[in-house]
Amino acid sequence: MDPIVVILFVGLALIALVMVYTRTYLNIMGADEKCRATWKVFDAALARRGELVASLEAALAGRGGRGREVLDALSRGRAAVDAAEQPADKIVASQALTQTLRELFAVAERSTALMTNPDLVALMGQIAEAEKDLEQARRAYDEEVRSYNALVTSFPGNKIGGMRYRPRMSVRARRGGNGAGRELPWTRF
């Protein structure tokens, strides 16, 4: 074989390899940036819900009985979300707060005194809307994480991304299923 043909063949193979490496690395970087951007939206939705929950706590302050237990759990849940720094911790704390909100809404539905207070019902409606926004942000984040994880866990991304890019945890991973199509209990407000 002619040495020039071998050199050309090796050169073209190296150029192709560099192109695949560059393209894959840029795809991973782009997917990582999309995950960060959708996390910011998710985090902003968490902050909005946190402000509304703080208002709800203030509106419900001074009530006793079963409502007090749920209100204390609500305060602890909101504090846990605010204190969490890592995304995985924030996701877990947010899900616990969502469960506590469900319990509070169930208590409120059974209480005539709470359901006749128009300010409280309006605030609960705002929280329900914030939960819907949060659910949309969760879905968007999960979709971006799914795409990102597919890139960094499959070949050649798993070799090219190396130590820098690791799979991310999706919001649904800790929720015990996909939860698609499930109606939130507070959609009546």
Image (spheres, rainbow, N blue to C red):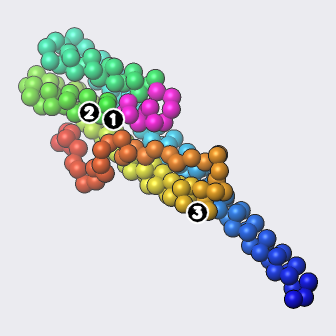
In the image, 95 versus 124, the foreground residue is 95
The residue under label 1 is 95
- What is the C-alpha distance between the residues marked 1 and 2? 6 Å
Q: Is residue 173 left or right of residue 112?
A: right
Q: Is residue 95 visible?
A: yes
Residue ID at (50%, 43%): 39
How would you rate the neighbour count of disc 3 (Cα within 10 Å): few for under 14, some for 14-19, many for 20 or more? few
- The percent position of residue 11, horizontal first and vertical second, equals 84, 75
Magenta-span inclusion, residue 90: yes
Indicate which label's residue lies in the foreground, 3 or 2: 3
User: Is 118 rendered above or below residue 150?
Assistant: above
Badge number at residue 99: 2
How would you rate the neighbour count of disc 1 (Cα within 10 Å): few for under 14, some for 14-19, many for 20 or more? some
The residue under label 3 is 155
Q: Is residue 112 left or right of residue 49?
A: left
How would you rate the neighbour count of disc 2 (Cα within 10 Å): few for under 14, some for 14-19, many for 20 or more? some
Residue ID at (36%, 24%): 78
User: Is 13 rendered above or below residue 40?
Assistant: below
- The percent position of residue 30, horizontal first and vertical second, equals 61, 55
